[in-house]
Image (cartoon, helix red, strand yellow):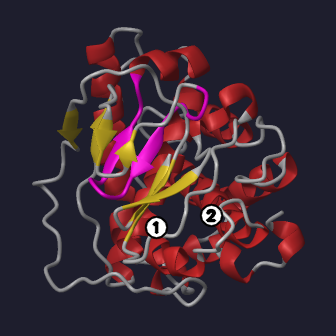
C-alpha cells in the first residue's frame, strides 16, 4: 500500500507478510523494483488497470519551485507551525457499484489533496496529483502486483497511484464509510511521504543483505506508523465538516487499531497510538516517527 520514489540502488525486497484481518489495506510488504520502493496492502486476481486523476488536480496548480527534501526527522514538513487546512469534503454515497465506488474515492482524494496543500505549501514541498485505480494491472511502475493475500490497497510512488481494487476493498470494508476513509487516508499519507522526500530518504536507510532484516523492518514500521498518523491528521481536518461527521472520523481513527501485531506495521497498540497522535496533534510534527524511541515504533 505504499511506495517510495527515489533510491538508485536495488536492495532485495523483504518477503511479504500477511496482515491479519486484511486491516486497512496497509502495506503488507516493501519491495524495491527498478529504484522504486513499493509498500503493499491487498490485491486481487489479474485485471486491467484503470487510473483516474483527482478532480481538483487542475484547480490547484503546483508550485514550480517546490522541491522534496530528502530528510526524515529533519524534514520541513515535520516542523512546528506546519498544519493541514480545515476541509469540507462533499462525498457521494458509498456503493458496491464499481463506478460509484471510483467516484467516491476520486472525490475523497481531491479532498485529501486540498487538506494537505497548506502544510506542503508551508514546507515548500510539492503536492502533485495522485491517481486512484479501482482495478489492478498485472504490473505497474512498482513491478508485479501483490497477491490477494498480501494487500487490500496500496500506493505506488512510481506512478503516484493508489490502487484500491473494488473486489478486495468491499470484501474488507463492506460499506463502512469509516473503514474506506481510514484506508484511503493512510494510502494518501504515503503519497505525502513521497512528495515531501521522506520516502526517498527512508529508502536510503534500507538495503540490508538480508531481505527480512530487523533493520529494514524497523524502517518500514516507522513509515507505516507515520502514514497512520498522517491519515488521522486528515480525519481531524475533515471532521464535523461536509460529509464526514465527528462520529465517522472517530470510527475511522479507531479502525487503525483493528489489525493484529505486525512486523511491518507495528503492534496493534502502536498502530492506534500513532493514529491518535495525529488526530489530536496540531500538525505533521506530531507524526515524527523517525525520532521516536524504538518501543514506540515496535
67 versus 161 height, above or below:
below
* Residue drawn at the location 62% of the way across and 36% of the way down: 24
Tell whether 70 sits left or right of 233: left
Q: Main secondary structure of the magenta part?
A: loop
- Crowding at dot 1, Cα within 10 Å, few <14 / some 14-19 / many 20+, comes out as many
Q: Nearer the viewer, residue 278 or 171?
A: 171
* Residue drawn at the location 43% of the way across and 52% of the way down: 188
206 versus 58 height, above or below:
below
Residue 49 point in image, percent of width and height: 25, 30
205 versus 113 height, above or below:
below
Q: CA distance from mark 1 to mark 2?
A: 9 Å
What residue span does the magenta drawing correspond to?
149-165
- Crowding at dot 2, Cα within 10 Å, few <14 / some 14-19 / many 20+, comes out as many
Residue occupied by mark 2: 226
Q: Nearer the viewer, residue 226 or 6?
A: 6
Residue 30 point in image, percent of width and height: 56, 55
Residue 241 point in image, percent of width and height: 46, 42
Q: Is residue 90 visible?
A: no
* Residue drawn at the location 37% of the way across and 68% of the way down: 35
Q: Quadrant of residue 258?
A: top right
Label 1 with label 2: CB-CB less than 8 Å: yes
Q: Nearer the viewer, residue 106 or 138?
A: 138
Residue occupied by mark 1: 193
Amino acid at each position: 500500500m505504499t511506495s517510495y520514489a527515489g533510491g538508485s540502488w536495488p536492495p532485495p525486497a523483504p518477503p511479504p507478510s500477511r496482515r491479519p484481518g486484511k486491516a486497512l489495506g496497509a502495506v503488507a510488504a516493501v519491495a524495491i523494483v527498478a529504484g522504486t520502493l513499493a509498500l503493499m496492502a491487498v490485491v486481487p486476481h489479474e485485471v486491467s488497470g484503470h487510473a483516474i486523476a483527482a478532480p481538483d488536480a487542475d484547480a490547484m496548480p503546483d508550485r514550480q519551485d517546490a522541491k522534496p527534501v530528502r530528510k526524515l526527522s529533519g524534514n520541513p514538513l515535520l516542523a512546528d507551525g506546519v498544519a493541514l487546512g480545515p476541509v469540507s469534503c462533499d462525498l457521494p454515497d458509498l456503493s458496491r457499484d464499481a463506478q460509484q465506488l471510483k467516484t467516491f474515492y476520486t472525490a475523497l482524494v481531491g479532498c485529501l489533496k486540498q487538506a494537505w496543500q497548506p502544510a506542503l505549501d508551508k514546507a515548500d514541498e510539492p503536492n502533485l496529483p495522485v491517481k486512484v485505480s479501482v482495478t489492478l494491472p498485472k504490473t505497474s511502475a512498482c513491478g508485479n502486483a501483490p497477491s490477494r493475500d498480501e494487500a487490500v490497497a496500496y500506493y505506488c510512488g512510481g506512478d503516484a497511484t493508489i490502487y484500491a481494487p473494488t473486489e478486495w476493498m468491499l470484501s474488507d470494508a463492506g460499506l463502512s464509510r469509516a473503514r474506506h476513509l481510514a484506508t484511503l487516508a493512510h494510502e494518501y499519507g504515503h503519497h505525502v511521504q513521497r512528495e515531501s522526500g521522506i520516502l526517498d530518504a527512508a529508502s536510503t536507510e534500507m538495503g540490508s543483505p538480508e531481505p527480512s532484516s530487523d533493520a529494514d523492518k524497523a524502517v518500514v514500521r516507522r513509515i507505516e506508523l507515520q502514514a497512520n498518523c498522517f491519515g488521522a491528521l486528515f480525519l481531524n481536518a475533515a471532521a464535523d465538516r461536509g460529509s464526514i461527521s465527528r462520529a465517522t472520523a472517530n470510527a475511522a481513527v479507531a479502525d487503525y487499531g483493528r489489525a493484529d501485531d505486525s512486523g511491518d506495521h507495528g503492534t496493534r497498540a502502536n498502530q492506534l497510538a500513532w493514529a491518535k497522535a495525529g488526530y489530536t496533534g496540531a500538525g505533521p510534527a506530531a507524526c515524527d516517527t523517525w525520532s521516536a524511541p524504538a518501543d514506540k515504533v515496535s
